[in-house]
Image: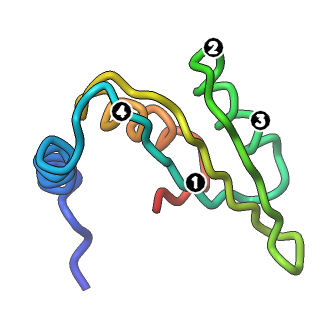
């Protein structure tokens, strides 16, 4: 299976966001991260001072944690930049 091209993915996402929302708009980011190693805090830090509402839920075995972040973003470019920023956290999966 081929790995999707991130540039193509973000280009498609930007078009979808532009077509489906009026900006600025609230956006729900969802991530899955390993529960250890301060990964949750690293993600929370990326949304610091943005007025984000962050919810976490640990998996049944406690190995992973889902992190949902509802935050007002100014435009599709800001959403994509935030995905790229969070993508720098080791082990994170963006949904």
Q: Going by the image, does 19 lie left or right of 88? A: left
CA distance for labels 3 and 4 = 24 Å
Q: Nearer the viewer, mark 4 or mark 2?
A: 4
Q: Earlier in the sequence, mark 1 or mark 3?
A: 3
Question: Residue 82: x percent and y percent?
Answer: 42, 32
Q: Earlier in the sequence, mark 1 or mark 4?
A: 4
CA distance for labels 2 and 1 = 21 Å
Residue at 73% over, 48% down: 55
Q: Nearer the viewer, mark 3 or mark 4?
A: 4
Tell me, yes or no, whether the two marked residues, 4 and 2, touch with CB atoms within 8 Å: no
Question: Residue 73: x percent and y percent?
Answer: 39, 27
Label 3 crowding class (10 Å Cα cut-off): few <14, some 14-19, many 20+?
A: few
Screen quadrant of the N terminus = bottom left
Quick one: which residue is furthest to the bottom in this view?
A: 1
Label 2 crowding class (10 Å Cα cut-off): few <14, some 14-19, many 20+?
A: few
Q: According to the image, label 4 marks what residue?
A: 25
Q: According to the image, label 1 marks what residue?
A: 92
Question: Residue 21: x percent and y percent?
Answer: 23, 43
Q: Nearer the viewer, residue 72 or 80?
A: 72
Q: Which mark identifies residue 41? A: 3
């Amino acid at each position: 299976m081929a790995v999707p091209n991130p540039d193509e993915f973000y280009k498609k996402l930007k078009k979808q966001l532009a077509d489906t929302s009026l900006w600025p708009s609230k956006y729900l980011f969802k991530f899955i991260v390993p529960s250890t190693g301060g990964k949750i805090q690293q993600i929370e830090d990326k949304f610091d001072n943005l007025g984000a509402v962050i919810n976490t839920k640990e998996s049944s075995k406690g190995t992973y944690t889902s992190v949902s972040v509802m935050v007002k973003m100014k435009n599709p470019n800001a959403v994509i930049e935030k995905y790229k920023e969070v993508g720098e956290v080791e082990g994170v999966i963006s949904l």
